[in-house]
Image (cartoon, rainbow, N blue to C red):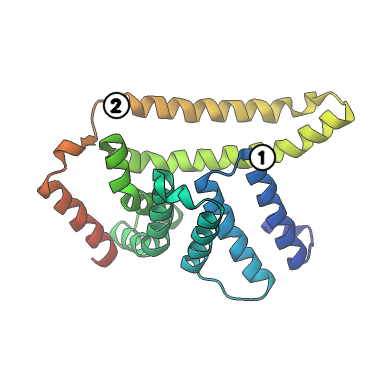
Amino acid sequence: NRLLRRRGLAAERRYALLICSLLVFALITGWRVSLVRAVAMTVASLLGRLLLRRTQPLYSLGVAVFLLLLHNPFAVLGSSFWMTTSATAAVICCSGPISERLARFGRWLPRSLAQAFAVVLSAQLGSIWWSVRLSKSFFLPGVFFNVAGGFLAALILWLGLALLLPAWLLLLAGVNGSCLSWPAWVLCQLLRLLKGLAAWLARLPWGRLYACHLNFFWTAALVVLFCWLLIG
């Protein structure tokens, strides 16, 4: 949006172009549950701006859930529906208070990093029950490393999307795409870095909390931590 605004495009054209881009992206990558939820929420927010109407994230989530169930009512039977819905609701409701709490607790922590960590922590807390139910364990260091992983994934996504259109146009024109070799090399290195980080985390011998260890005291400790981050 900022890039298009710098190009001098009017707000109506910017929002319409972003909506079309999101729909094309979802069409290319496949209409997965989490992707449909994200696209529907973003499109609802952009339509609200386009119609000069104020939107609320929770209302956008409700619209996304309604459209998702309208498209596939059996989605409620899958774990991905509940994980993406609970994680998104937790991010909407809890990331703000957690970010403010972290900013007060550690003044040495940059606000942008506190916000990123608050989003990851909120998503993890919102979906922890489903994660434990599916994998029978919860990986505690993943809460911290997901901040770096999320940044890398976003960078890979945007770089890949930026290379997609030029590569497609060069392919249609029958032109040699060697001019894109350097950005493609950067994208490849970022993918290797993300893959290496995931493999290294999977080999860590410590930090995994198994479902059989989630007794009353561990559960109470997690609840106390969550309440402290929100209210304390």
The residue depicted at 50 percent of the width and 56 percent of the height is 69
Q: Position of residue 7 (x, y in %)?
A: 78, 57
Q: Residue at x 28, y 47 (%)?
A: 129
Kindly identify the amino acid type of the residue bearing the numbered disc 2.
Answer: Leu
Judge the density around disc 2: few (<14), some (14-19), many (≥20) Cα neighbours within 10 Å.
few
Which percent across, then down, holds residue 185?
65, 25
Q: Secondary structure at mark 2?
A: loop
Q: Is residue 212 left or right of residue 88?
A: left
Name the residue type under label 1. Answer: Ile
Check the image and report above or below for 56 versus 42.
Answer: below
Q: According to the image, label 2 marks what residue?
A: 204
Q: Earlier in the sequence, mark 1 or mark 2?
A: 1
Q: Nearer the viewer, mark 1 or mark 2?
A: 1
Q: Which mark is residue 70?
A: none
Please determine whether, in this image, residue 78 is positioned above or below residue 189: below
Instruction: Work out whether residue 110 can be spotted.
Output: no
- Residue shown at 31% from the left, 51% from the top: 125
Q: Nearer the viewer, residue 168 or 24?
A: 24
**Could you say which quadrant of the image residue 92 lies in?**
bottom left
Give the SS element for disc 1.
helix
Task: Decide if residue 4 is on the left or right side of residue 204.
Answer: right
**Which residue position holds label 1?**
28
Residue 43, percent from left and from top? 62, 60
Q: Residue 162, image x and y in percent?
A: 70, 40
Given residues 42 and 8, the one toward you in this image is 42
